[in-house]
Image: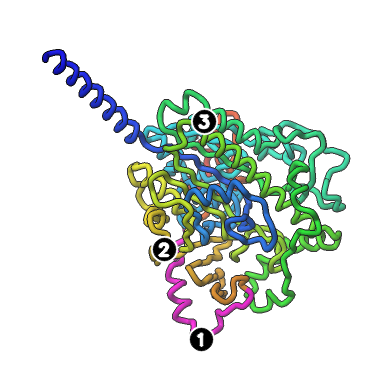
Amino acid sequence: MKLMQATKLFIFAIMVMIGVSARAADERPPNVLFIAVDDMNDWVGFLGGYPGQVNTPHLDALAASGIAFTNAHTAAPVCCPSRVAVMSGLLPSTSGVYNNQHWWKPHRPDLVTLPIHFRNNGYQSIGAGKIYHHTVGNNPPSQWDDYHRLVFNDNAWIRYGSPLYPYSKPKQRPKTFPFAGIVNYSGEVDWGVPPGLAEKDYDDAVTVDFAVRFLNSRESTDRPFFLACGVFHPHLPWYVPQRFLDQYPIDTVVVPEINLSDLDDIPEPGRKLALRKADNLKKIRDAGKWRVAIKHYLASISFADAQVGRLLKQLRETPHAENTIIVLWSDHGWHLGEKGHWHKRTLWEEATRVPLIISAPKVGRSGQRCDRPTSLVDLFPTLIELCDLPPVKSLDGISLIPWLQNPNAPRERPAIIVEEQGHMAVRTDRYRYIRYRSGEEELYDHRIDPGEHENLADRDELSNLKQKLANYLPTNLAAPAASKKSYQFNPLDYSWTVRKTESIISGTGENHTLPK
C-alpha cells in the first residue's frame, strides 16, 4: 500500500514537473526575425503589381503562412528616413530625419529604437546587412549585441573611395564596367553579372550566412532574440548571378505603359519629383535597354527572394520555429518608367507601396490578406505588443494586432508618407491624397483609377473629402537633422564632432562630441 502511494506521489511529482516545464516553455517570450529588403516595390507574386510572371516562391509562401498587408506603405520614399521611421516608430515629421544625408544618432541620441527596446527588456539584439541606412554612421554599435556590416563584396568598386563606405575592401574596376554598357552612365545605375564572383560571395548571401550561423548557435538559445537581417537587393546596382536572369527571357519582360499626358494635371512640385531622374530613363530607352534593365530588376527581386528562402528554411530546421515572429518589409518602392520616372522619392503608389508580411505564432490565421491602409511605423508598436514588452510613449504608429486577428476589421487611420521637401501624402482604403508644400494637391480614386492617372483634386464636389484627408497630415514638422556635412565622424570610435562652422547643438558654434 505504501509502495503504491509512493508510486502515485512519484508520478504526480513527475507530472507537475512536466507541467511546469511545458508552462515555462510556453511562457518564454517569442523571438523576432525581422527581415528588411531594399527598394522592392509591389512586383512580387503575392501582391501582383507586375503584369507578367515574377518568381518569388519564398515570399509567397511566407505570405501564405502569415498575414499579407496588401495596402502597406512606407513612411518616406527614400532609404534613410524610411528605415529610421521603422526602427523608431516615428514619422520623419516627428524625428526630423527627412533624407539620406541625415545621421539620426547625433540628432536624436536618446531615441529608443526597436533593437534598444528589445535589449532593454532581456532580448539579444543581433543585426546583419542593411537595417538602418547602409552608409557609415547609421548603425551605431550600441544598438546591437552583435552586428555584421554590409561590406559590398559584389559592388565594392562603386563604393570604394567614398568616406561613407570605409568597410568595403578596395577593388579595381573591371574593364567591362559599367556592365550595362551605357556610355558615361556608370555608378549605382548599373546592372549585370559581376565577373568571377561566386553566388555565395554576394553580400546578401554573406549577410544571410551570418543570420543562419546565429540561428544555429548556442547563443540563440540563451535568451529570446531580436534578429534583424537586411537584404540589399533589389537596390541598385542590379548585379545578380546568371541563373536568376535566366528566369526572365527577354521577350517575356513587360515594360510599363507610359502615358505622355500623365503629368499634365499634376502640380509643378509633383512634375519636378517625376522629372528628377528623367535622364536615367531617357538614357536607358535611347540605348534600347529598358526591357533589359527591367529584366535585371526582376532577377534582383528573385535573388532577394532566394536569400530570404535560405533564411526561412534554416529557421524551420531549428527549435525556434514554433516561437518566432517573422516580419518582412521593404523600405519603399521603385518606379521603372511610370509617370516618366526611374527612381524612388515620389509620393505615388509605385514609390510608397511595399511588401509587408507578419507571421506571428498563435495570433490570427495563416493565409490571410489585409487591404486596410498600413504604415511601416506600425511595426514598432505591433512587435512590442506581440512580445508583451512595455509600451513606448508617443509612437506615431498603432499596433496591427487587431488586423492580425481580423484582417477585415475597420481602420480609420490612413498611412502617412512624408517626402524630404515637406510634401506629404495620405493613403486610405480608397484614396491617395497628396499635398505639396505649396498647398497644391492631387487626389486619386483607386477604385476606378489604380494607376493614378486622373488627378481629381480640382473637383469642387470633393472638397470635403480633401479636407478630411488633409486633417491627417502632420502640421508641426520637426526641425530637420543637420546634414552629414555638419559633422566630423570617426568610424574607429563611432563618435561625431560638430564642425565649428555649424551651430546646431547648443547654439554656441563650439565643437561637441556626441554620445555613441
Which element type, helix, strand or loop, lies under badge 2?
loop
Q: Position of residue 363 (x, y in %)?
A: 38, 48
Extent of the magenta region = 453-478
Q: How crowded is mark 3: few (under 14 residues within 10 Å), some or many (20 or more)?
A: many
Q: Name the residue under label 1.
A: 460
- In the picture, the disc for residue 215 is 3
Which element type, helix, strand or loop, lies under badge 1?
helix
Distance from the alpha carbon under mark 1 to that under mark 3: 58 Å
| Colour option used | rainbow
In the figure, residue 437 lies in which quadrant?
bottom right
Badge 2 amino acid:
Asn
Give the farthest residue toward the front. Answer: 1
User: At 52% from the left edge and 30% from the top edge, which residue is drawn?
Assistant: 215
Name the side, left or right, on which 44 lies relative to 17.
Answer: right
Closer to the eye: label 3 or 2: 2
Q: Where is residue 2 in the image (x, y as percent from the top left)?
A: 12, 13
Q: Position of residue 239 (x, y in %)?
A: 75, 44
User: At 50% from the left edge and 53% from the top edge, which residue is drawn?
Assistant: 96
Up-down relation of residue 37 to residue 30 (above or below): below
Residue 467 lies in the magenta-colored region: yes
Name the side, left or right, on which 433 lies relative to 11.
Answer: right
Badge 1 amino acid:
Asp
- In the picture, the disc for residue 32 is none
Q: Position of residue 6 (x, y in %)?
A: 16, 16
Q: Mark 2 points at which residue?
A: 408
Tell me whether the residue at label 3 lies in contact with that at label 2, contact meaning CB atoms closer than 8 angstroms. Answer: no
Which element type, helix, strand or loop, lies under badge 3?
helix
Q: Earlier in the sequence, mark 1 or mark 3?
A: 3
